[in-house]
């Protein structure tokens, strides 16, 4: 009887078509491994926040029961930092006395805070409160400020209890996402410049706070692509109104001398570079190994010899 079953053909892995297909599979596998490595980095997902139109340094986990910081109606034109009243116009204000109750840092004059208004831009009437606190920070060392801090404060505490915290030394922890050097307007407090930093607080990573500091640690990065862990001790000033990408919002503002930079050790950065290098080497080695194994199999496995073709036997039908 004739065997009409189809013969099993062995693939020729040495052919160009098969080698291209195998190479494509190996490259696809390497691409998947690389994408998995990059996907685990939170900074690669910032574009989600940009698509949503949120004015925040980085996206973060949502925090429940946080106050709504949107503000209506729009504020007037910003005046601080800017031009203020001349010294002659507010000479009488300087007669304000320093606090003697022990509720504030030594030298702070609470009378100046009567002119500070929340949910507004920086106003001219607030210039004495603004530069008075900066002057105290400039004349006081970092260790003394840290020792006199009333402790850690959260975003919700400063936002919801601004009157209780105004002029008090508080400590914040988080990640600075942007820094900008700014010249100070003319004043008679001896302040020439400061830095504006957008802080992503640990307790509320979805909404930034603003820190104005006189100095930054040596080597601290500047610009809009910053991600540095810091601890900040400074005076809470006010709940400031600013123009976000989507609408007007408000956020706490803290005045500080400097920041404590929790700089990542150099070894940690080298590990990240080494991981990428190792993944690349593994991918290349895997591709070379697969190709080598397939070539060996193709050479060592000989195809089954074909049986000679026999014509059909019709002798049974003739009988």
Image: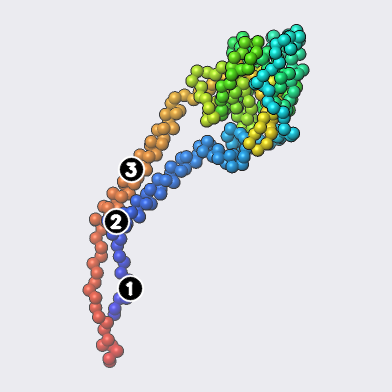
Which disc number belongs to residue 5? 1
Side (left or right) of 278 relative to 110: left
Give neighbour class at mark 3: few <14, some 14-19, many 20+ (Cα, 10 Å).
few
Please identify, in this view, whether the residue under mark 3 or under mark 2 is nearer the observer: 2
The one of 114 and 12 positioned closer to us in this rendering: 114
Which disc number belongs to residue 161? none
Which element type, helix, strand or loop, lies under badge 1? loop
Side (left or right) of 208 relative to 32: right
User: Which residue is label 3 attached to?
Assistant: 285
Labels 3 & 1 near each other (Cβ < 8 A):
no
Q: CA distance from mark 3 to mark 1?
A: 41 Å
What's the residue at 23%, 67% (across, down)? Answer: 305
The picture quadrant where one finds residue 79 is top right
User: Which residue is label 2 attached to?
Assistant: 16
Look at the image and tell me whether residue 111 can be seen: yes
Give neighbour class at mark 1: few <14, some 14-19, many 20+ (Cα, 10 Å).
few
The picture quadrant where one finds residue 12 is bottom left
Position in image of residue 308 (x %, y %) = 22, 73
The picture quadrant where one finds residue 199 is top right
Of the two numbered discs 3 and 1 on the same chain, state the one appearing first in sequence: 1
Which element type, helix, strand or loop, lies under badge 2? helix
């Amino acid at each position: 009887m004739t065997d009409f079953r189809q013969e099993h053909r062995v693939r020729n892995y040495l052919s160009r078509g098969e080698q291209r297909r195998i190479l494509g599979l190996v490259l696809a596998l390497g691409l998947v491994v690389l994408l998995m490595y990059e996907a685990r980095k939170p900074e690669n997902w910032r574009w989600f926040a940009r698509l949503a139109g949120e004015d925040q340094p980085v996206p973060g986990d949502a925090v429940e029961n946080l106050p709504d910081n949107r503000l209506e109606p729009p504020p007037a034109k910003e005046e601080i930092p800017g031009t203020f009243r001349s010294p002659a116009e507010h000479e009488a204000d300087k007669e304000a006395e320093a606090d003697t109750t022990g509720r504030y840092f030594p030298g702070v004059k609470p009378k100046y805070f009567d002119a500070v208004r929340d949910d507004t831009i920086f106003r001219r009437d607030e210039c004495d409160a603004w530069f008075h606190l900066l002057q105290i920070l400039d004349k006081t060392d970092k260790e003394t400020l840290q020792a006199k801090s009333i402790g850690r404060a959260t975003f919700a505490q400063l936002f919801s209890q601004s009157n209780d915290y105004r002029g008090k030394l508080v400590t914040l922890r988080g990640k600075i996402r942007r820094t900008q050097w700014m010249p100070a307007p003319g004043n008679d407090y001896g302040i020439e410049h400061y830095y504006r930093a957008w802080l992503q607080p640990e307790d509320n990573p979805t909404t930034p706070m603003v820190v104005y500091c006189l100095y930054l640690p040596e080597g601290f990065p500047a610009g809009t692509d910053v991600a540095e862990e810091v601890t900040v001790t400074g005076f809470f000033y006010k709940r400031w109104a600013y123009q976000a990408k989507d609408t007007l919002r408000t956020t706490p503002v803290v005045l500080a001398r400097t920041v404590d930079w929790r700089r990542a050790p150099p070894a940690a950065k080298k590990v990240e570079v080494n991981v990428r290098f190792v993944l690349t080497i593994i991918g290349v080695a895997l591709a070379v190994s697969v190709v080598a194994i397939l070539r060996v199999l193709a050479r060592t496995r000989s195809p089954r010899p074909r049986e000679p073709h026999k014509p059909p036997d019709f002798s049974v039908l003739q009988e």
